[in-house]
Image (cartoon, rainbow, N blue to C red):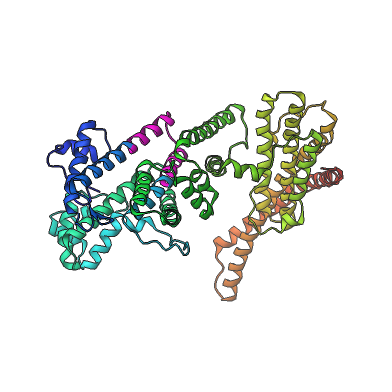
Amino acid sequence: MAGIIGWKPHRAAGESTWRKFIHGKRIHQDTRKDILGEIAADLTPQLTEEERTVEGQVIPLEVIKDQLHEVLVLHSNWWDGLCERLQSAIPVESTDIINMAVLRLAVVEVAIRASALFLLVDYRVDSSAQQETARIDVQKFLLPMILRQALKRAGITRQQLAEELGVTKEAVDQWLARDALVAVERLDEIAEMLSAGMGQDPDFLRRILRLARGWTQLFRGVSARVDSEEPNHMVNALTGMIQSALVSLKEQVAPLGTLERMSVLTHLLLLGSDLPPGPELRRAMLAREAGDDWKGVISTPMHEWEAFLTNALSIEKHALDMKRIRSVKGFTFLWADEERTRLSRMIGVFVSPEKLRSFLGPDFKGTPEQLLALMGRFLNYYRSEEYNHSEVERPEAWRMSMEIAESSQLHIRSARNDHERMRWEVLIWFGYAQGIALLTKEWQEIDARDDTLEMLTWLKRIPEVRRSIPPLPEKVDPVLQGTLALLRAQLSQLENLESISEFLEGKLEQEELDRALAALQNRLAQKEQAGREPDSHAQEEATRLKALSTTLGEKMKDVVARSRTKRAEMESLLRQLRGFSLS
C-alpha cells in the first residue's frame, strides 16, 4: 500500500532497508517498528476533527497515532508469525496442492478480516439478500491489460509511446506482454504522458498503474506455484466469502454501541477469526458455499492449520510413495492416470472428512461373501440398461477395476488376520474379473459397429491387460472358486480375441487397397469419357494394386479360416461366461 501511494520513510530506514521491507524480507525488529511508527505519524494528521469524533468526544491526534502504530505492529507481527507457522508446518519442498492449501487457508482468513475492515470504514452492506457476486476475470486487472486500455483511451500508439519515453517499440511490446512488470519509475513517466490524452489527474493514474503492478506481481507469484486456473478461482471465492462474512458480521454488531462495536471489529481485524465472532462468520461462509472444495478450508480455524497441512503433506507423501511402488512393482494401472490421481489428491486435501464419510458410507466390515456380492452388484450396474443410457460421460470403468485389484495387492501385505486377508483376496481377483468383463463389454459394442480400425485399437489393450494379471492360484478358498473360474475363462477369451488381430490388419489393408484401386479406376474412367488418352502411369498403378489385392486375398483365405475357428471358440467361451453367477 505504501508503494501504491508513493510513500517512503524519511528517518526510520535507508533505501536498501526500505526495499527489503516492502519485498517481504526480514529486517531488524526495531527498524520495522520505527518504519511503522513513521507511517502512523504521517497518516494521522490527515484525519479531520469530524473523523476523530466518537460519541461526541474528539480523540486527540497523539492517541490515534499511538493506536494506529500499535495496530500496524500487531498486524506485522501476526503476518510474520503466520509465515513462520506455515514454514514450520511444511518442512519439505512444497507441491502445487500444498501451496494451494496454504493460500486457501489464508484467503478465508483474509475474507474474515476484510469484512471487519470494511465495516470499520463504514462500507455499505445490503443485508436484505446475498446476491450472487459477478465472476471476476483476474487477467483484466493485470498491468499489461490496464496499460493497453490506457493507451487506447489516450489515443497513443505503441510507437508514439516508445518515442516519447526514448525506448524501442520492442521494449513497449514487452511491457504489454502477459504478466509483464514495468519499473515503478517508468510507470510514473507513462502516467504523466497518458494523463493529458485521457483527461485524468496524473497522480490518480499513477496510483492506478502502481496498484495494477502490485496486483500483477501477486498474480505472477501465485501462478508460479499453483495451476493456471487457481488464482482466478481464489479471487472469486474471496469476493463471495467477504460478502457472506459482511452480511453476517453486520447483523452481529448491529445491537452494539459505537465503542463496543469498534472494539469487536478491531479485535477481529487484528487477532483473527479464532475469537468471536470469527467462528460464526465461518458458519455463514459454509452456508453460502456450494462447492465442497472450499468447505474443508473454511471449516478449519487458524489454530488447526498445522493439523490441516499435516494431513495434506501425508496425502502428498502417499502419492509419491505410490508412484515409487508402482515403478518397483511394475503395476500397469495403479496411479497411471495423472489427471485422476491429482483429483484424488485434491479431494483428500480439500473435502472435509465428514463429507467424505457421508459420501463413502461407513467402513465396510462384512464377510468375504458379502463383499463379493457387493462387487457383483457394481458389475451388474455397469452391465445394466441404466448405465448404458446414462447421459453422464463415463470414464473407462474397466481401468478403475484393474486399479482396485492392483491397489488391493498392496493392502493385503498389511492384513492383520485371515479374515482381513480374505477380504483383500476378494478385491484382487474380483477386481481383475470385473475389469475384464467391462473391457469385453466394450468389445461387444465395437464388434457390433463392425469398425475395423476401432477393433484394432481396442485389441492393442489386450497384451497390457494380460501382462498385468499375476499367475492365478490353483488352490483357493471356496468363496473365490467361482471368481477364479470366471477369470480363467476371461483370459482364454482375451487370448482368442488377440489372435484375430492378424485377420483385422489384413482386412484393413485390403480395404485401403480397394479404396486406392477404386479411386484410380474412377480417374481412368473420367479421362476415357472426356475422350482423352488414359494416363499410362495410372494404368500401371491400377494393375499393380490389382495384383497386390489378389495376393492379399489369397493370403487372407488362410487367415479367415483360422479366424473362424477362433471365433467359434470365442462364442463357446462367451456362452460359458454368461452362465457364471457374478453376484
Q: Is residue 468 above or below residue 392?
A: above
- Does residue 558 appear in the picture of this structure? no
Magenta span of residues: 78-107
Q: Quadrant of residue 337?
A: top right
Q: Is residue 101 magenta?
A: yes
551 relative position to 222: left or right: right
Point out the residue furthest to the front here: 56
100 relative position to 413: left or right: left
Q: Is residue 350 magenta?
A: no
Q: Nearer the viewer, residue 569 or 418?
A: 418
Point out the residue furthest to the bottom here: 530
For the point 17% across and 67% down, the residue is: 197
Residue 424 position in % (x across, y down): 72, 31
For the point 56% across and 63% down, the residue is: 536
Please tell me whether the stretch drawn in magenta is mainly helix, strand or loop: helix
Image mark count: 0
Residue 64 position in % (x across, y down): 22, 47
Q: Nearer the viewer, residue 507 or 437?
A: 437
Q: Nearer the viewer, residue 313 or 363?
A: 363
Q: Nearer the viewer, residue 54 or 285?
A: 54
Residue 238 position in % (x across, y down): 42, 52
Task: Quadrant for the C terminus, please.
Answer: top right
125 relative position to 530: left or right: left
Q: Is residue 285 above or below residue 496?
A: below
